[in-house]
Amino acid sequence: MLEKINQTATYIKGKVSIAPEVGIILGTGLGGLVREIEQQEILEYKDIPNFPVSTVEGHSGRLIFGMLGGKKVVAMQGRFHFYEGYDMKQVTFPVRVMKFLGIKQLFVSNASGGMNPNFEIGDLMIINDHINLMPNPLIGANIKELGPRFPDMHSTYDPSLMALAKEVAAANSIKIQEGCYVGTTGPTFETPKEYYYFRVIGGDAVGMSTVPEVIVARHMDIPVFAISIITDLGVPGKIVEVSHEEVQIVGAKAEQKMTLIMKQMLTKL
């Protein structure tokens, strides 16, 4: 895998002039943030050696380099999921590559279902912890050049980045929630009892992404900030039929607030 990572990173460095400081992964319906990126240099996933290709509606499949909030960034407009049939090493491969491109922080976003009864559709939730119910992406032989065999996860989401996000949200009068994200394989949306179970074990929101990427980032000692847009509710009495299209619509409405927070965070880094 190390050879493939180096091969991909070398190809990308030969195609773009920007050496990114921060990596950004954009979730379902949240690709609009790229409109704020200046001096864009774009690579299609299909043209990048060893890269998977997004197969999910709402995930464009482009790697976008440029300036955001005064920082050099690389944004994934579209991510990869275990439920698409990719293995966990493929799902997290872009995070490995971004590390080799030079990123110092990783910002991750997603659309998720909220189990916390205090949440409302359209809320933003800063992720402060996660519960992983997917296969761990670090299973298999460990490559010591990438990170330790047993990486510590007691402070997975960077406290200073979370504090900065809250500061920016408060300054812009943006309501913000905070909680634990439960990562599941999907692709089915949750049953009422699954929502209940995820809440009982400590979850505030649930989704089908993010956790593998975060685990791999922390394996390589990259500080992580992650945020969810609550696109539907798994709260007893509020559970309704949900579709992927509805998730995209709610995500698109809330992403302006998320974009503002991320952009101003970058400015203050």
Image (tube, rainbow, N blue to C red):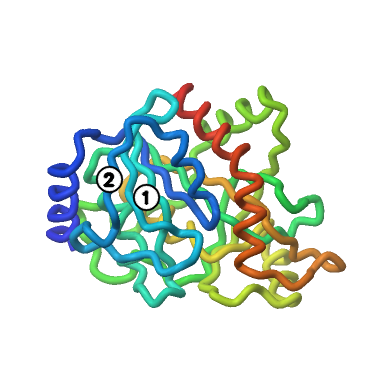
Rendered view: 191 above or below 144: below
Inspect this view and state whether residue 147 appears.
Answer: no
The image shows residue 231 at horizontal and vertical percentages of: 67, 57
Inspect this view and state whether residue 43 appears.
Answer: yes
For label 2, the SS is: helix
Numbered mark located on residue 217 in the image? 1
Q: Earlier in the sequence, mark 2 or mark 1?
A: 2
Q: Is residue 57 left or right of residue 19?
A: right
The image shows residue 143 at horizontal and vertical percentages of: 21, 59
Choose top left, top right, bottom left or bottom right for residue 205. bottom right
The image shows residue 39 at horizontal and vertical percentages of: 32, 31
Judging depth in this view, the residue of 42 and 173 nearest the camera is 42
Are the residues flagged by discs 2 and 1 in contact, CB closer than 8 Å? Answer: yes
Classed neighbour count for the residue bearing mark 2: other residues with Cα under 10 Å, few (<14), some (14–19), many (≥20): many
Disc 2 marks which amino acid?
Lys
For label 1, the SS is: helix
